[in-house]
């Protein structure tokens, strides 16, 4: 019987992979459902096994079965891993994704699975933590905090109970790496969490997955059941979010697991010392934990050998939005933004010029193509007034209205604010209003030029429509004041970082805000 | 009375569930998810029953139910369409598609159509960001929504 591989990843299914798989089954093939290799312009991708090698075809439709099986289909790709998109990658974390059946333990073991856990359990906890430190791994959830140091804190904490919590809330637009890993190689995350458990002395873990990811939830649940014996005495369970972006923030996430409103806690205490149920807790992103099996099985040096500056190892970059070759591209840090967008991504899907890219989700800055020489690196991006975040890159063509995007950033913040602090809760609503006035004034040819002063009260409460203040210049001044207040007065990054997209849009694309010339002002 | 019956039913369901899954506070979200799955929504009369079952105050439960976007206070339509509003989908024409969807489905974002046939809800990213605009139609993901795909969705939810 001919063996055929078709992805079961949510993106592939959204593009029709289920129907394609059914058509091959109906034609008498043995269909193996894998994760996605991560290039969506060739999905649904079908790989046919011939003499032990896989020959790819994509995108494939259900009616293409015969042409694919006799090899005459025009969308023949040959060896998929040799395509330029894949050949240039360094797949440490995603090596198995798209290759194996995600829910086949034998497949996982045959492709190097569990070697990291075995290696970890053969050495003392401190040695595991040392390896993670030596790898240079920094948290992939956004802040880039060294994972080994976080683990050391939890290891050193004295307590009867400790927890490992995986942050799989992945709420950023433009990001999907966590989802793809959980759907395509769930045992890898489970193995990483079990290693973390051994490293810090925790025997219970939670994976908190957002409810928008039904496929990942189902796959993780099944994989946890299948691997329960393998990871014992470490035990895992899935918790499902309920549509609140802020629950990606680590302390809000902990409150959510505890059955409370997902509100941000003031730090200290750090979750590493008093986290879930008040106990010492490791809380890490999916990609941070999934990087650990490689570090333990291949060695910290092998991981640290790749990268740029203080950003070691690989980053699964996600190319999204209006991009020709969108998908997941895992590579060492240091590649430039331009290489990613124009080289690998192939520019826009619409064929129009790239005008802006937002890096790092809804709290990330917008960059113009003139900044495309930025190297992908935590420090370089911070210096340029932005952030890498979870490495999502959203591409926009020249039809984008950047004032509209700035308004959306404020609106998103107001919808998702946890409500704990005033600058975020009220400031974002005021921000939407200010943006509405800027857009109205821009569209109506502005005349007013009177400047208004700053200050918290002014920014938060005094921007009711005022005939004298409604001109463009006073309104943009007010917008800057408001952003300042949000940046310095917010408890967490939701309110604190919303100024990044807003001010970067204003600074790099002033013409969309009705201003004639670029305003040169550092956002940081 | 109909309402009383619904409350009794909810109370019984909640009791059954907590007997199996426990009564600790951290069971609240799983319980709410399950209840919404069973009954379709978490309405006000269910709140005291949940509070009793988990030994919480009503205010506690009410606070949680209203905090999370997922929990519905009233029944949804027969079909639920969740349309992504986030940046990557916007970069691919999502805003125009949203306008078109509300017009063609005859229902505003966040509302249920009068005839109870369809509920249209915003969602902020489905993790399908390179193939937008995207939607979940009764839990099924649909990518690259254009006029033709939208027409198919309209047909489906009108049936
Ligand atoms: C509003 C907000 C949303 C966040 N969302 C996520 C998320 O979806 N996933 C994630 O891993 N971290 C998210 N973070 C960062 C977490 O608070 C935390 O830094 C991270 O989970 C730590 O894991 P790491 O060290 O492995 O990166 C978010 C932070 C904020 C302020
Ligand atoms: S900044 Fe916003 S989301 Fe963060 S704690 Fe304050 S109110 Fe909550
Ligand atoms: S932005 Fe729409 S799916 Fe991510």
Image: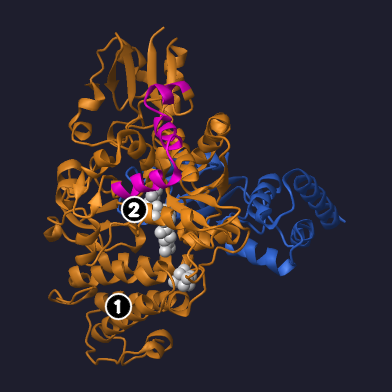
Same chain under badges 2 and 1? The reply is: yes
The majority secondary structure of the magenta stretch comes to helix
Q: Closest to the observer: A185 or B75?
A: A185
Give above or below for A425 relative to A199.
below
Total numbered labels placed on residues in the image = 2
The chain carrying label 1 is A
Classify residue A340 as left or right of residue A425: left
Quick check: is the Cβ at mark 2 less than 8 Å away from ligand 1? yes
Disc on the earlier residue, 2 or 1: 2
> Is A29 located above or below residue A134 in the figure?
above
Q: Residue at x 74, y 49 (%)?
A: B22
Distance (Cα) linking label 2 and label 1: 31 Å
Q: Which chain is blue?
A: B
Above or below, A43 relative to A512:
above
- Location of mark 2 (residue): A390
Please state which of residues A372 and A384 is positioned toward the viewer in this rendering.
Answer: A384
Classify mark 2: helix, strand or loop.
loop
Q: Is residue B11 left or right of residue A101?
A: right
């Amino acid at each position: 019987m001919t063996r055929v591989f078709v992805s079961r990843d949510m993106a592939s299914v959204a593009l029709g992979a289920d129907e394609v798989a059914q058509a091959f089954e109906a034609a008498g093939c043995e269909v193996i459902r894998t994760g996605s290799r991560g290039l969506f312009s060739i999905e649904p991708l079908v790989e046919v096994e011939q003499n032990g090698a896989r020959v790819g075809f994509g995108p494939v439709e259900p009616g293409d079965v015969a042409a694919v099986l006799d090899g005459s289909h025009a969308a023949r790709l040959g060896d998929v891993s040799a395509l330029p998109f894949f050949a240039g990658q360094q797949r440490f974390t995603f090596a198995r994704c798209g290759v194996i059946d995600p829910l086949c333990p034998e497949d996982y073991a045959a492709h190097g699975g569990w070697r990291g856990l075995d290696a970890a359990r053969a050495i003392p906890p401190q040695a595991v933590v040392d390896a993670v430190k030596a790898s240079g791994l920094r948290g992939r959830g956004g802040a880039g905090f060294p994972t080994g140091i976080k683990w050391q804190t939890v290891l050193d904490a004295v307590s009867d109970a400790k927890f490992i919590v995986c942050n799989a809330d992945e709420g950023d637009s433009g990001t999907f790496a966590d989802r793809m890993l959980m759907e395509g190689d769930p045992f890898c995350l489970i193995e990483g969490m079990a290693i973390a458990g051994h490293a810090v002395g925790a025997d219970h873990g939670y994976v908190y997955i957002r409810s928008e990811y039904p496929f990942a939830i189902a796959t993780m649940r099944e994989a946890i059941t299948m691997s329960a014996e393998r990871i014992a005495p470490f035990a895992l369970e899935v918790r499902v979010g309920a549509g609140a972006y802020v629950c990606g923030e680590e302390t809000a996430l902990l409150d959510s697991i505890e059955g409370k409103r997902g509100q941000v806690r003031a730090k200290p205490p750090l979750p590493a010392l008093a986290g879930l149920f008040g106990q010492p807790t490791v809380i890490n992103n999916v990609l941070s934990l999934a990087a650990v099996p490689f570090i333990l099985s291949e060695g910290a040096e092998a991981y640290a050998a790749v990268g740029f500056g203080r950003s070691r190892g690989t980053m699964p970059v996600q190319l999204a939005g209006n991009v020709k070759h969108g998908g997941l591209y895992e590579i060492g840090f240091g590649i430039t933004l331009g290489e990613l967008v124009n080289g690998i991504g192939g520019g826009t899907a619409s064929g129009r010029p790239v005008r802006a890219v937002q890096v790092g989700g809804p709290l990330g800055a917008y960059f113009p193509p003139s900044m495309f020489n930025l190297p992908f690196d935590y420090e370089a991006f911070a210096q340029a007034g932005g952030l890498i975040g979870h490495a999502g890159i959203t591409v926009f063509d020249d039809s984008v209205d950047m004032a509209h995007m700035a308004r959306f950033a404020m609106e998103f913040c107001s919808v998702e604010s946890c409500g704990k602090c005033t600058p975020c809760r009220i400031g974002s609503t005021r921000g939407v209003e200010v943006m509405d006035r800027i857009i109205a004034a821009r569209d109506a040819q502005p005349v007013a030029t009177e400047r208004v002063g700053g200050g918290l009260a002014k920014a938060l409460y005094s921007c009711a429509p005022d005939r004298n203040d409604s001109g463009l210049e006073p309104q943009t001044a007010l917008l800057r004041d408001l952003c300042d207040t949000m940046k310095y007065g917010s408890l967490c990054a939701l309110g604190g970082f919303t100024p990044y997209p807003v001010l970067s849009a204003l600074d790099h694309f002033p013409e969309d805000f009705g201003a004639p010339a670029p305003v040169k002002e550092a956002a940081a | 009375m109909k309402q009383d019956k619904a409350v009794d039913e909810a109370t019984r369901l909640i009791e059954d569930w907590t007997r199996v899954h426990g009564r600790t506070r951290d069971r609240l979200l799983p319980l709410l998810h399950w209840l919404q799955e069973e009954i379709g929504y978490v309405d006000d009369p269910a709140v005291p029953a949940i509070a009793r079952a988990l030994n919480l105050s009503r205010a506690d439960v009410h606070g949680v139910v209203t905090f999370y976007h997922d929990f519905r206070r009233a029944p949804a339509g027969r079909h639920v369409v969740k349309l992504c509003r986030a940046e990557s989908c916007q970069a691919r024409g999502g805003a125009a598609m949203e306008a078109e969807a509300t017009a063609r489905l005859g229902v505003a974002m966040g509302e249920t159509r009068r005839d109870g046939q369809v509920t249209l809800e915003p969602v902020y990213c489905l993790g399908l960001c390179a193939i937008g605009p995207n939607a979940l139609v009764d839990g099924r993901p649909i990518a690259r929504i254009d006029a033709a795909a939208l027409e198919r969705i309209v047909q489906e939810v009108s049936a």
